[in-house]
Amino acid sequence: MDTKALQLASRFSLAPNSLGYCGKNTATQRFITCIQSGHCQFVEDELRKFIVLYPYYKTIAKIAKQPLFSYKVIESYWIGNDLLTQAKPEHYDILLEAFKTQGVPEWFVAELRQNRPAFFIPNHLFQVLYIGVGKASGAVPFNISSINNCMVRWGNVEQINSSRLTILLNSLRKNGHRYELVKKRAHLKIDKKIIKEVKLGDCVGVHWRMIVKKLNKAEENKLEFWTKKICASLG
């Protein structure tokens, strides 16, 4: 068991699960326990029940010949790393087959098969923008508000007021057929169960308006690089 990898997966999976969008209702407390204590023995089982997340882990692991729940696989999906450079357009079929196995509706898989991307980058933002946030599960409408909530946004803490932070977040806006990065200020509550301490100037990652991780400079750079890369590939 790669505890560090499962803690990373738990951080980013916690918000949509706690909102009832993905996974089973048993997962939330197991994710929190994993983050807090490193006791992650049930997390792999919970992640296997996510309808679109688990197929991406399977796809990346198969392409890169890496263990399914390894840190590099999980980081490549949520933040981005060099494993993504190994993905080719033909690997898109691996994802679609994994979708079918996971229970994504057959009509939707058939639609995705007909509309193939010019570039295949099996990262969370590809799922959000190309496959379409909410389209597989019907949990939320596919619009710019859902896109910004679901994408992994990041930014620096500008102000701390008790448990509420003001953060200048990198977000997306639609410009014609393209998506481009813009800065949007957000006021978000910090959950001390997930992040114990944040200082002014820290860079944090946000998912579904939950502050899920302090990002180091390398993670910030990877997230920015792959966000821009995916937006450009879909333009």
Image (cartoon, grey):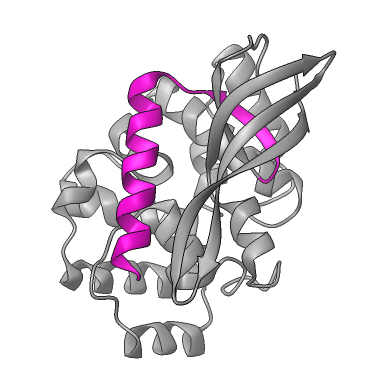
Residue nearest the observer in this picture, 183 or 145: 183
Q: Residue drawn 59% across and 38% down? A: 169
Residues rendered magenta in the picture: 208-235
Residue nearest the observer in this picture, 116 or 218: 218
Say if 154 sits above or below 38 in the image.
Answer: below
Q: Residue drawn 61% across and 54% down? A: 148
* 181 relative position to 194: left or right: left
Residue 39 in percent (x, y) is at 56, 18
Q: Does 103 lie within the magenta span?
A: no
Q: Residue drawn 44% across and 55% down? A: 125
Residue nearest the observer in this picture, 179 or 76: 179
User: Based on the displayed image, in which of its 4 quarters is residue 233 positioned?
Assistant: bottom left
Overall secondary structure of the magenta section: helix
* 160 relative position to 146: left or right: right
Can the viewer see residue 92 in this picture?
Answer: yes
* 183 relative position to 177: left or right: right
* 122 relative position to 162: left or right: left
User: Based on the displayed image, in which of its 4 quarters is residue 210 positioned?
Assistant: top right
Can the viewer see residue 194 in this picture?
Answer: no
Q: Does 223 lie within the magenta span?
A: yes
Outermost residue toward the right in this view: 162
The number of discs equals 0
Residue nearest the observer in this picture, 36 or 222: 222
Q: In which quarter of the image is the C terminus?
A: bottom left
Q: Residue drawn 75% across and 54% down? A: 20
Residue 168 in percent (x, y) is at 62, 33
Q: In which quarter of the image is the N terminus?
A: top left
User: Based on the displayed image, in which of its 4 quarters is residue 87 positioned?
Assistant: bottom left
